Image (tube, rainbow, N blue to C red):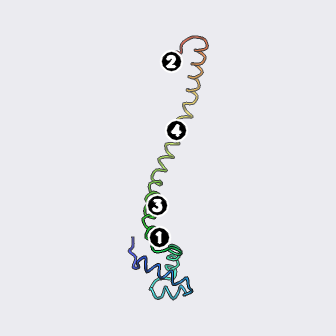
Amino acid sequence: MKQTRYSVEQIMAAVNQHEPGTPATDIARKLGIAKQAFFRWKKGFGGLKPGQVRDLRPLREENAKLKKIVAELNPDKTMLTDIAKKWRTRHSGARRWSIYAVITASAKGGSVSSS
C-alpha cells in the first residue's frame, strides 16, 4: 500500500481547519493535495478526535482480515449445503421405505430383512 505523506495529526488539523469556514480549496492548496483527497480525509476522519483515529486503524485492519476469512469460507459453506441437499433428496425415499419396513415388520411381530 502507498505510504502517506501526512500523519494522522496533520490530517486531523486540516479537517478541523475546514470546520470553522476555511475553504477546502485553500487547505488543499497549502498541503499540496487534490481537493478530492481532502474530502476523502474529511469523510474518513471528520468528527473524530485524534485518539479515536488511532483506535480506528487496528479495528479497520481486523475488519479487513475478518472479511477475507468470510469470503474464503462462504464458497465452502455453499458447496457443503448443496451436497447436503442432494444427499437428502437422493436418500429420502430409501429412508422412508426403510422406516416403513421397520414399522410394518414390528406391527406384524416379525423381523426386517435387508435387501
* Among the two numbered marks 2 and 3 on one chain, the one whose residue lies closer to the N terminus: 3
* Residue holding disc 2: 114
First-in-chain label (2 vs 4): 4
C-alpha separation, residue under disc 4 versus residue under disc 3: 31 Å
Query: Is residue 35 left or right of 1 when viewed as pictured?
Result: right
- Name the residue carrying label 1: 52
Q: Characterize the local packing of mark 4: few (<14), some (14-19) or many (20 or more) Cα atoms within 10 angstroms.
A: few
Q: What residue type is labelled 4?
A: Ala
Residue 1 is labelled as none
Residue 112 position within the rendered picture, expressed as x and y whole percent measured from the top left: 53, 15
Residue on which disc 4 sits: 84
Q: Given contact means CB atoms under 8 Å apart, are the residues at marks 1 and 4 in contact?
A: no
Residue 45 relative to residue 109: left or right = left
Q: Which of marks 1 and 3 is in front?
A: 1
Give the total of numbered labels.
Answer: 4
The Cα–Cα distance between marks 2 and 3, rounded to whole angstroms, is: 54 Å
- Residue under the image location 51 percent in, 40 percent down: 83
* Residue found 56% across the figure and 11% down from its top: 110
Amino acid type assigned to the residue bearing label 3 in the image: Asn
Residue located at (57% from left, 34% from top): 89
Q: Is mark 1 on a helix, strand or loop?
A: helix
Q: Earlier in the sequence, mark 1 or mark 4?
A: 1
Task: Report x, y in % for residue 36.
Answer: 52, 79
- The reply to whether dot 4 and dot 3 touch (C-beta < 8 Å) is no
Identify which amino acid the numbered label 1 is placed on: Gln
Left or right of residue 42, residue 3 in this image: left
105 to 50, vertically: above or below? above
Numbered circle sitting on residue 63: 3
Which mark's residue is nearer the viewer, 4 or 3?
3
